[in-house]
Amino acid sequence: MQLNTKILVMVVLTVILLSFSARSQDKTPVTFYPSHEVKKQNAPFSDVVQAGNLYFLAGQIGMDHTTRTLVKGGIVAETHQAIANITSVLKQHDMDLDNVVKCTVILSSMEDFATFNKVYSTYFTKKPARTTFAAAGLARNAAIEIDVIAVK
């Protein structure tokens, strides 16, 4: 499937999920959480949005939040850091990687897929559902961005 088709499928699935969620809004409270990272608290998005027992995390790149810089070392180092960032956000909500049920992975190049997968598989041992694709122009010129959905 080409990238445009994959993006279209993701948009359609998101619209379906949102329409289902909108119908149940009166029964399911939605909470928009500010970032636990002080320097990200004024960002124009939430690190986590909770709907019932579902937690939708914003995408994480391989940024060291203490220095606000992308880690050096390419796809391996950035994957480790992105997952560490996800772990940190999950911890703020009393969860860990075992609570993750869905991952969306965006690589800057599919040439990094095998290397990324070796690192990824050491962390996500329960094998959550996953979508992986490549796109140019990730934030901060990152090699990878990962977002997850977790259930508590």
Image: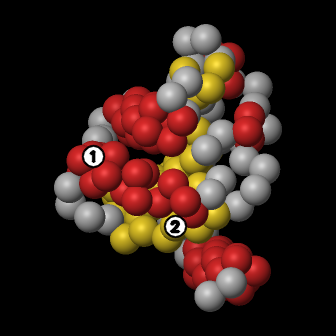
Q: Nearer the viewer, residue 51 or 74?
A: 74
Q: Quadrant of residue 88?
A: top left
In the rendered image, residue 134, in percent from the top left (x then y), is placed at: 64, 63
Residue behind mark 2: 132
User: Residue at 40% of width from left, 35% of height from top?
Assistant: 80
Q: Nearer the viewer, residue 141 or 101?
A: 141
Q: Nearer the viewer, residue 60 or 75?
A: 75
Q: CA distance from mark 2 to mark 1?
A: 16 Å
Residue 26 makes an appearance in the image: no
In the rendered image, residue 128, in percent from the top left (x then y), is placed at: 32, 65
Residue behind mark 1: 123
Q: Amino acid at mark 2?
A: Thr
Identify the secondary structure beneath mark 1. Answer: helix
Residue 69 makes an appearance in the image: yes
Q: Amino acid at mark 1?
A: Tyr
Identify the secondary structure beneath mark 2. Answer: strand
In the rendered image, residue 94, in percent from the top left (x then y), is placed at: 30, 36
Q: Residue furthest front?
A: 111
Q: Is residue 70 left or right of residue 127?
A: right
Tags 2 and 1 touching, CB below 8 Å:
no
Q: Nearer the viewer, residue 50 or 5?
A: 5
- Count every numbered label the image shows and give the total: 2
**Are there few (<14), some (14-19), or many (20+) residues within 10 Å of tag 2?**
few
In the rendered view, tell whether residue 26 sits above or below residue 149: below
Please identify the quadrant where the N terminus is shown: bottom right
Q: Is residue 115 left or right of residue 13?
A: left
Q: Quadrant of residue 2?
A: bottom right
**Are there few (<14), some (14-19), or many (20+) residues within 10 Å of tag 1?**
some
Tag shown at residue 59:
none
User: Residue at 68% of width from left, 24% of height from top?
Assistant: 41
Q: Is residue 28 left or right of residue 120?
A: right
